[in-house]
Amino acid sequence: MRYTEADQRRLYHLSKTLLQREVPTDKEAAAQMAAQLREVINYHEYRYYVLDDPVVSDYEYDMLYKKLEAIETQWPELVTPDSPTQRVSSDLSHDFPTVRHLAPLRSLANSYNAADLLEWERMVRRLTGVPDEQPIEYVVEPKFDGSSIALVYEHDLLVRAATRGNGVEGEDITPNAKAIRAIPLQAPFSSVGIAVAELRGEVLIRKDVFKKLNEERIAQGLEPFANARNAAAGGLRMKDPRETASRHLDAFVYTLNYAVDAQGNDMHHPIGTHDKAMQLVGRMGFKVPTEGHKVCKDIHEAIAFCEAWEQQRDNFPYEIDGMVVKVNDYELRARCGSTEHHPRWAMAYKFKARQATTKLLAVEFQVGRTGAVTPVAKLEPVHLAGVTISSASLHNEDFIRSRDIRIGDTVLVERAGDVIPYVVKPLLELRTGQERPIEFPRHCPVCHTPLFRPPGEAIWRCINNQCPAQVLQRIIYHVSKDGMDIEGLGKANVERFYQLGWLRSLADVYRLDYDKITQLDGFGPKSAENLRQAIERAKHNPLHKLIASLSIPLVGKKVAKLLAQRVYCIFDLQQWTTADFEQIDGIGPAVAQSVRAFFDNESNLRMLRQMEALGVNMCQTEEDKPHKRTAHSPLAGKTILFTGSLEHMTRKEAQEKAEAAGAVVLSGVSKKLDILVVGNNPGSKLRKAQQLGSVQILSEKEFLELLEQEG
């Protein structure tokens, strides 16, 4: 199926119109609306499943689908053989051979609130005959936002892997699936009497791995992936399995879709429940949902679990867009049955949408604390992830140019957790010809100093260190939790004090007039005294916190700790050359030049001397000093590095544990490296360490055992 630009523009606007319309009560009008809904749904399925390039949010698609379902439920005679409700969506292409699944891989019906789930349970009770006073047990699992896969095992060997396709047939991607290490090449199904099994699962990428993957692509001059789901789906369709392996894909199994013994007898009923089946599959070496998984005694416990996970979805290591509630008992599932589209024994609880389409009205350019000039999209307000969005990041000039984003474009906007919303892409097919290119400034929008773009960077910077916008943002960061952590001096108060003329440099934070503060609305003697005490405590912070709070470009917490470990006083850095900085493992030429430039600036040194005179600590504390190796501390004093995906903690958590035990975390493999901890799907770092021969290579389990010895 191919659509012209005119078709795409028409179908997009028709979709928006249909979303605003109620389902007609008149049959003739309903028939007309159903025909329109079928047309737009088929188009959006093509964009989503074939092109991996949707132009509406998941929520909007679901609402269109529900309207069509409502019409066809009320007037069954309006159902057509080619209606999207009579089949599941297709991702078939001509790149891979087509194979037939052993059992249908159906979609899921969607719910968005507790009322939907309660209504669904009433249907389950009608179908199963279970009385209201008897609770039904449910299993709740994460709804992964990845790419579906079906794995077939015969006589314990993986013989086939396929995409979901149209639910009946999919694409054979067996060589690529074998490149995913989370998928076992063999599993002992015969030990429980299963001769042939088909497992359904999801291929996806951990959030931290995806972030690193994009960083590597940017460093290679390649376009970053728009999201983890697209990266996973594309990885499954690589012509070369080695390319699939380079994506560091992961795979979870969440359904035993088909299982028979040697005589062809179904094995689900002997197993009994979905939870027991997943425990069995997990014991055979597959990754199954454990975090975010719960067996619930009734629908109310299931609802509470879903709602709790919606609040903490950002803590999940993978992208999830909802939870799935399933009847646990296989016998009850059989009584529920399935439609052509979805099983009646399962329901997806979808989280609030994180993508939406809206109009780009204008672009403002904001100056940050290091002089970085960031383009910010001003949008036609749109409701997204529970809030109304009117601004979004456009990253940098290269991002705008590579995607040809223009003022007046209809754009796709995404918001993940508390991260600022950002523009994903323009919808080129919806252009009218009235859109205008975005002109990136060549002078600072605040102080009008000519902007400078350092070689190798994507960011234009204002190089005027005294630019008012930079000064304000540096003060805001200095007092923040990531800086000196001064409670009571948040962004709003810093801006207020700045407008009053009380704050013009970091040093001014430590000479505020508390008598004047007491006179302000919202303050009093007690709150002013609390602020004074918080600032006094901050004066005694360790040196590494001070260095990190100074907004030196490219210097974050890690580099600040490396510097603080190697000097007695911050002013010692004034004497260092760029070569001295580069001697520290973890500091490269760009960082070295940035720190050198900071200490070459006399106004920065003057500010530090003023802060010292006001009582701010400038010297190394016990917290700054590197740990010494002792017989009782197997990690203390050693250099360590992590590679691959860890199962029991995030990479950041592992690094923090190692540092707490006295180790120094490096950023790459070198002769200075003592220990390399290897997780799933390790990359080139493992090969480099093996070639060196001097590096101790540990598994995640062995690393945790060392920590226990430390404890």
Image (cartoon, helix red, strand yellow):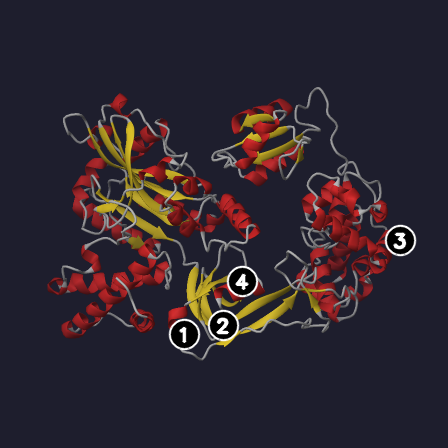
Please indicate whether residue 75 sits to the left or right of residue 281 in the image: left
* Residue at screen point 41% across, 59% down: 353
Q: Quadrant of the C terminus?
A: top right
Q: Which residue is mark 4?
A: 399
Q: Mark 3 and mark 4 in contact (Cβ < 8 Å)?
A: no
Structural distance between the alpha carbons of marks 4 and 3: 45 Å
**Residue 36 vertical position relative to residue 457 in the rendered view, above or below:** below
- Report the front residue among 697 and 144: 697
Q: Which residue is mark 3?
A: 613
Label 4 residue SS: helix
Q: Give residue 68's quadrant in the image.
A: bottom left
Q: Nearer the viewer, mark 1 or mark 3?
A: 1
Q: Which residue is mark 1?
A: 431
- The type of residue carrying mark 4 is Phe
Density class for disc 1 (Cα within 10 Å; few <14, some 14-19, many ≥20) is some
- The type of residue carrying mark 1 is Arg
